[in-house]
Amino acid sequence: MFKFTDTIQMSEDGAWVHLKDRGRFAYLDDDKSKPIRIKVRGPDSPTLQAALRKVNAQKMKESAGTDMAKMSVGEIEDLLERGKGNIPNTWRLATITWENMPDGKGGAMPYSDDAARDLYDNNPAIVRQLSQDAGGIDDFLELADAS
């Protein structure tokens, strides 16, 4: 009997994304036994959606009364540039945990919200990979099935 996929629960449980570097899967060790992976919530996650609503409400509150018609080109460019920060922040909110994230000293960095913020702000290639591999529901579900 056919049953629709529970995309809400799968999104809430999350899926592992094995990071790549220059197109190759990344590992913390030379033996390739410690994959560098990030577990993220999917697009249908109620937890993620609630967090994004909260962030969006704050942004709307901050921009209340902004009249773009009265803004200079430079002010509009600044506004758009600040908006680029939304994508790394979305992935920070979607991140559940990670494994074997290099700490730059030969070890693994533990997951924390602050560490995720730093990682995503300083590594746009990771943000692009998360967006590509897990940003759409179909891609996310494929990862979740493999997790």
Image (tube, grey):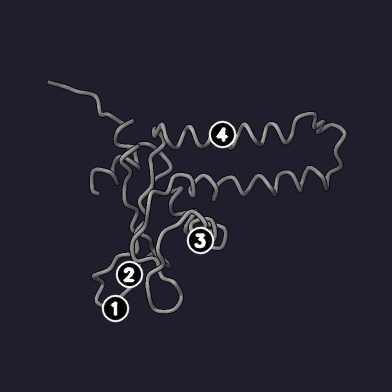
Nearer the camera: disc 2 or disc 4? 4
The number of discs equals 4
Q: Tell me if label 1 and label 2 are in contact, CB under 8 Å.
A: yes
Element at label 2: loop
The residues tagged by marks 1 and 2 sit, at their Cα atoms, a distance apart of 7 Å
Q: Earlier in the sequence, mark 4 or mark 1?
A: 1
- Mark 3 element type: helix
Looking at the rendered structure, the kind of residue marked 1 is Asp
Label 4 Cα neighbours within 10 Å, binned few <14 / some 14-19 / many ≥20: few
Q: Quadrant of residue 19?
A: bottom left
The numbered mark, 2 or 4, whose residue comes first in the sequence reads 2
Q: Which residue is mark 2?
A: 27
Identity of the residue drawn at 27% across and 68% down: 34
Residue at position x 12%, y 20% in the image: 1
Q: Are marks 2 and 4 in contact (CB under 8 Å)?
A: no
Please name the residue that numbered disc 1 is placed on: 30
Where is mark 3, residue-wise? 119
Amino acid at pointer 2: Tyr
Q: Nearer the viewer, residue 10 or 96?
A: 96
Residue assigned mark 4: 54
- The x and y percentages for residue 91 are 48, 48
What element does badge 4 sit on? Answer: helix
Q: Earlier in the sequence, mark 1 or mark 3?
A: 1
- CB within 8 Å, label 2 to label 3: no
Q: Amino acid under label 3?
A: Leu
> On screen, 62 above or below 82?
above
Dot in front, 4 or 1: 4
Q: Residues within 10 Å of mark 2 (few under 14, many from 20)?
A: many
Marks 1 and 3 in Cβ contact (< 8 Å): no
